[in-house]
Image: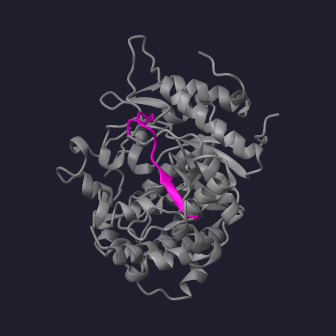
Amino acid sequence: MNPFKDNFTWGAAASSYQIEGAWREDGKGPSIWDMIAHQPGRIYENSNGDVACDHYHRYREDVALMKEIGLQAYRLSVSWPRVIPTGRGPVNEAGLAFYDRLVDELLSHGIEPWVTLYHWDLPYDLFLRGGWLNPDSSEWMAEYTAAVVERLSDRVTRWITINEPQCMIGLGYLKANCTHAPNMEVGMREALLAAHHVLMAHGRSVQAIRAHAKKPPVVGLSLVGCASSPLTESPEDIEAARNATHYVDGTQLWNHTWWGDPVVFGHYPEVGLKSYAKDLPEFKSSDFDTIRQPIDFMGMNVYWGGNTKAGVDGGSEWVPFPKGQPHTHFNWPISPEILYWAPKFYAEHYKLPIVITENGLSSCDSVALDGRVHDAGRIDFLHRYLLALRRAVADGVDVRGYFHWSVMDNFEWAEGYKHRFGLIHVDYETQQRTLKDSAYWYRDLIRSNGACLALPQQP
């Protein structure tokens, strides 16, 4: 029996800076990623997103390819500086009109738009005002959200406020591993302050969506799916993995409870308050009234996870992967079981429906002599991970959708064009698109609503 319900959503995702290009056309303002990418030595091979996949001009072709794959939904993001060039003030009609056209094109092909409001491309002018370190940043986000929702919500009902706050602050602000824009390199106290402002911005954004939506909205946010799998399925190892999943390490920001608990429960987790104790900035208790807004689902971006076993003292003990563990081109270990345990642990903790808003792998894909892209590794990756997700759904975890990252190869932030995550191969010199073998595999999966996962994989 196929556990996926008929209304399960199969889609793919991308983000504005990574694919759109047209970085200063039609009134668009610069973003913090334009700033960083134009600084020599910041990005692999000094690449930038000036053109990227030229999606701004080729969106009709791209949507037609999405239709050919059979996508039921496309998770896009809106470029804040394309809509409001300086981050505040007048709306740029030409920029907002692009998203009008894109939404209409998707709907005309039977593809539902899921709109992410913020995927890291903060307007440069707001960076000059302190960016996410400025306590007014949540007000900026609310104003921007209102402008987009007023325009698109007669057709768009699925909204994601912010994508991966762990990355945007952990890689953009915290000195220990700062590689992303705006590359502020601040200490933990300042990073936690920026993180708090981001959570406030999420709350204000949810309020703006619900205040301005012309149709009943479905609202969530997307967190990095930080989680651990048990080494065995003994009750002791499962509990150890659960505890490790919810743990907060005070030296870094890679966790989910510091970000998700305030949104759902209205307070920071006790384990985080202890772990970050020496670096905690002051927060007003009333802030959590803003942060804790009702959301309809929890989005998770899940790529890999480590293994944990019960320690001799009853704690959790990390278990290294065996030598030769398969890994992606990004050197992330391939660990399919995480797509069972991460949704399970999150759903138990938050009592919310789960949507896998990103999952996929980076590969060294190329067009073969026969003109096709034979990415057997991606097909095997997807098959393994989706079998784990199927098991989660069969076990009663309320998973509502799955979005492959990404719909097409694109600009991978500080890594430039080194990595290829897409179902569609992009030749960045010619902008030629080629559906990969994995795109056809995913098309068959969607047609069967996941039922084909129960069948042996064909050679």
Kindly give the residue lying farthest to the left in the view shown: 40
- Residue at 42% across / 14% down in the picture? 371
Is most of the magenta stretch helix, strand or loop? loop
427 above or below 342? above
Q: Judge whether residue 316 is colored magenta.
A: yes
Q: Is 212 on the left or on the right of 62, as rendered?
A: right
Q: Is 364 on the left or on the right of 202, as rendered?
A: left
Between 242 and 375, the one lying in front of the other is: 242
Residue 357, percent from left and from top: 57, 49
196 above or below 221? below
Q: Judge whether residue 178 is colored magenta.
A: no
Residue 333, percent from left and from top: 45, 41
In which quadrant of the rendered view does residue 298 lie?
Answer: bottom right
- Residue at 64% across / 42% down in the picture? 107
Between 457 and 435, the one lying in front of the other is: 457
Q: Is 91 on the left or on the right of 204, as rendered?
A: left
In which quadrant of the rendered view does residue 209 lie?
Answer: bottom right
349 above or below 430? below
Between 148 and 273, the one lying in front of the other is: 273
394 above or below 117? above
- Residue at 17% across / 50% down in the picture? 40
Residue 70, percent from left and from top: 63, 31
Q: Which residues are magenta?
A: 314-330
- Is residue 239 in view from this perspective? yes
- Is residue 436 in view from this perspective? no
Kindly give the residue lying farthest to the right in the view shown: 1
